[in-house]
Structure formats: C-alpha cells, structure tokens
Image (cartoon, rainbow, N blue to C red):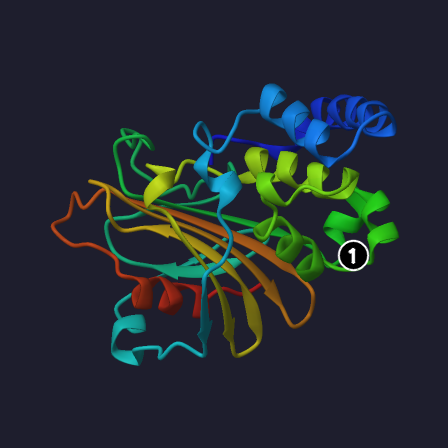
Amino acid sequence: MKKNPAKFIPLIILFALAIVFTAAFSGPKILTAYIETGIGSCSKIPILCKMPTQEIINPQIDKDYTSTLIPYKFSKLSIAAPKGFAVIQELEKKLYYKKRLNRHKESVLYAFHQEPGYFTKLFPQVKKIGINNNYDFIKQLAFARIDGIKNIADAFFVILKSIFTPDIGDQNKVVMASFVMPGRRGFISYNLFDKEYYFDCDIVMDSGDFFKVYVRDKGDKGTRLELKEVFAIISTLNK
C-alpha cells in the first residue's frame, strides 16, 4: 500500500490537537465543517460517507480453488494467493521475485500484521470511549462518517479513515461489508466496477491479531478475482 500510517502519526496528533481546540468552542456542525475544510468533503473523499451495508456470514470456501493457490511464508505471516500476483508483506519481498517487477503495473497482494492490542497501544486515548481491542477499533473505523460526527472521537476516526484507506479506485463505486468466518472476522471494502478490481480487507483473528490484506487485480492474466475467491484467500491467512 502506498500509505504508511506510521508516517502520518505526527500529522494526526497535530490535527487532533487542533480538533480539541475547535471542539472546545463549537458544536458538531462547526466540527464537521472543520474536518471538511482540513481533509475534504464526501464529494472529494466518498469513502468518508460510506459504511458497511452488507453482512456476510461464513462465506462458502471452495476447497478446489484454495488448492490452486500458491503458499507464501513471510516473517510475520503466511498466506496463499493466485498465480500471477506479486505477494508482499509490507515492504518485505521474497528472493524469487522477478527484478523487473513493477508493483504499479502488476496485480499485487499486500499483507500486513500486528499483534493483539496494536491500535490501543498506538492510540491509547481510544480506551476512554470503550475501544479495548483491535476489532473494536476497526469497527469504529469502518462506520466512521463525516455526516455522523457528533464529538471529538467521531472526528478522530474520520481522519484516520481518510488516512488508512488505500487506493480502491473510484470510491463512489466501493461497497463495504462486515464478515464473519471461522476463526476471524472483520470488514472488507471492494470495487468490482472499475477497469481494475480492488479489495481492502481488515481482519481480526480470534486471538486478537490484526491483519490487513489489500488486493489490486489488474486482470492482466486474463482472470478476475471475485469476492468469494478473496474470502478463500483470507481463509489461508495465518500468523
């Protein structure tokens, strides 16, 4: 993913302090206007007015399909992916990757892992609003909306949503859904309506471990991933 959340932490802190100052002298409407001026309105960043509208429970996993996937093992995680995809754990590459690989021109799958309690350690202030684990955090993030800002906490998560959302094509075409699978649950934003297909998956294991899987399918191998196939890929994800 092009965006590294850690790089934005100082910006987040400064912006959050500005929000606190603004909120102390204003109500939700002025706070919303402040966010729209500093980040952008829904017309500029449509994902900030979207939230999960689907609930997917135990999607059927095609074992025949998963048997065709190629397994990858990295330092923090393992996952299986279709042939023809560049598979990267954050910035870690496998030695057998072709040197000519261009991540912007190839179909790619990025994976990211953090331990239980990662977000509450990164942003300890969220415990004050009842967020105590990784799942609580990503749920709050998924449902954050500009038109739902009522307080500082709401504004904070709208800011984070704008930063943590990777390139998913035309955001007006994006569908958001929650999902539950054996041993894991989370949220997925997908776009199957552009020339390229996009899937942004935030996953929390029963153990509390957090994973992000981002897929950009350029269709350059003559095939297109469907939602059921992405869930099959997620089913292979492990620490």
Give percent across and percent down for residue 236.
44, 68
Q: Is residue 72 above or below residue 151?
A: below
Name the residue located 78 percent from the left edge and 27 percent from the top edge.
Answer: 19
Residue 7 visible in rendering: no
Residue 53 image-quadrant placement: bottom left
Pick whichever, 28 or 107, lies toward us: 28
**Label 1 amino acid?**
Ile
Residue 36 location, quadrant: top right
Looking at the image, which residue is at 33% across and 37% down?
170
Q: Nearer the viewer, residue 96 or 30?
A: 30
Q: Residue at x 52, y 59 (%)?
A: 187
Q: Is residue 238 left or right of residue 229?
A: right
Residue 132 appears in the picture as rendered:
yes
Question: Is 124 left or right of 193, judged from the image as shown?
Answer: right
Residue 119, x across and y down, in percent:
73, 48
Mark 1 surroundings within 10 Å by alpha-carbon count, few (fewer than 14), some (14 through 19), many (20 or more):
some
Residue visible at 18% across and 46% down in the picture: 219
Give the x, y percent position of residue 46: 44, 37
Is 185 above or below relative to 130?
Answer: below
Residue designated by label 1: 131
Which element is circle 1 on? loop
| Residue 87 image point, x, y percent | 38, 47
